[in-house]
Amino acid sequence: MSAFGFDSPDAQAASSGRSRQYVTFLVGDRVYGVDINQVREIRQWTPTTILPNQPHFTRGVLNLRGTIVPVHDLRARFSGTLTEATETHVVVIAAIGEQTVGVLVDAVSDIITVSTDDIRPVPASAAESDLAAIQGLVSTEDSMVALLDLAALFVAPGLEAV
């Protein structure tokens, strides 16, 4: 059963190792995906509590049923430009090892099932930091999806995912 409470033939194929499922979301006109097994929930944007001395892409923290969760702005992480968050934006709550993080995105778009054979490497011309953050690229009928490594994007040095 997936993190979203359903089990489908696609989910069964994904569990066999031949394919994997990804939750895809939008930031501007770009489509990104994360492994569905990392996603814990999807929440509407609400203001966060800002903490001092945080990276430029950290929007603050929120209290999620007693767990303090840092919320990171994916647009700011990649481009340096903060998202002007409104109630139409969403926060994808994800697990990175033992850590829970929130990722601010414009919208969640879909759940896709991808054959591991269809995942292509990131071209060598991309910046080195991009190579660490993007596990691969997948073409869908509508777009190219960049599959993210959340640990490479948001885990502080010394706190690597277990």
Image (cartoon, rainbow, N blue to C red):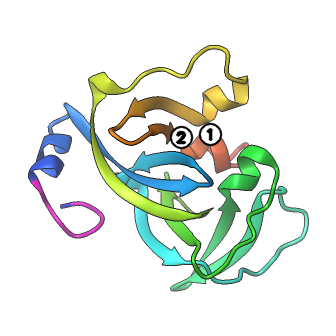
User: In the image, is residue 93 above or below residue 25?
Assistant: below
In this picture, which residue range is highlighted in magenta? 2-8
Residue at far left of view: 9
Q: Position of residue 111 (x, y in %)?
A: 32, 54
Q: Residue at x 65, y 44 (%)?
A: 153
**Amino acid type of the residue tagged 1 in the rendering:** Ala
Q: Residue at x 70, y 83 (%)?
A: 47
In the displayed structure image, the side of residue 62 where residue 109 appears, left or right = left
State the CA–CA distance, disc 1 to disc 2: 5 Å
In the displayed structure image, the side of residue 60 where residue 38 appears, left or right = left
The one nearer the camera, 34 or 100, is: 34
The one nearer the camera, 146 or 58, is: 146
Neighbourhood count class around disc 1 (C-alpha, 10 Å): few under 14, some 14–19, many 20 upward: some
Q: Position of residue 41 (x, y in %)?
A: 42, 70
User: In the image, is residue 73 above or below residue 78?
Assistant: below
Residue at label 1?
152
Can residue 5 be found in the magenta stretch?
A: yes
Q: Is residue 10 visible?
A: yes
Q: Position of residue 114 (x, y in %)?
A: 28, 37
User: In the image, is residue 93 above or below residue 20?
Assistant: below
Can residue 120 be found in the magenta stretch?
A: no
- The reply to whether the C-beta atoms of the residues labelled 1 and 2 are less than 8 Å apart is yes
Q: Position of residue 87 (x, y in %)?
A: 61, 82
The one nearer the camera, 60 or 24, is: 24
Residue 149: mark in rendering? 2
Residue at far top of view: 124
Magenta stretch, overall SS = loop
Secondary structure at badge 2 equals loop
**Amino acid type of the residue tagged 2 in the rendering:** Asp
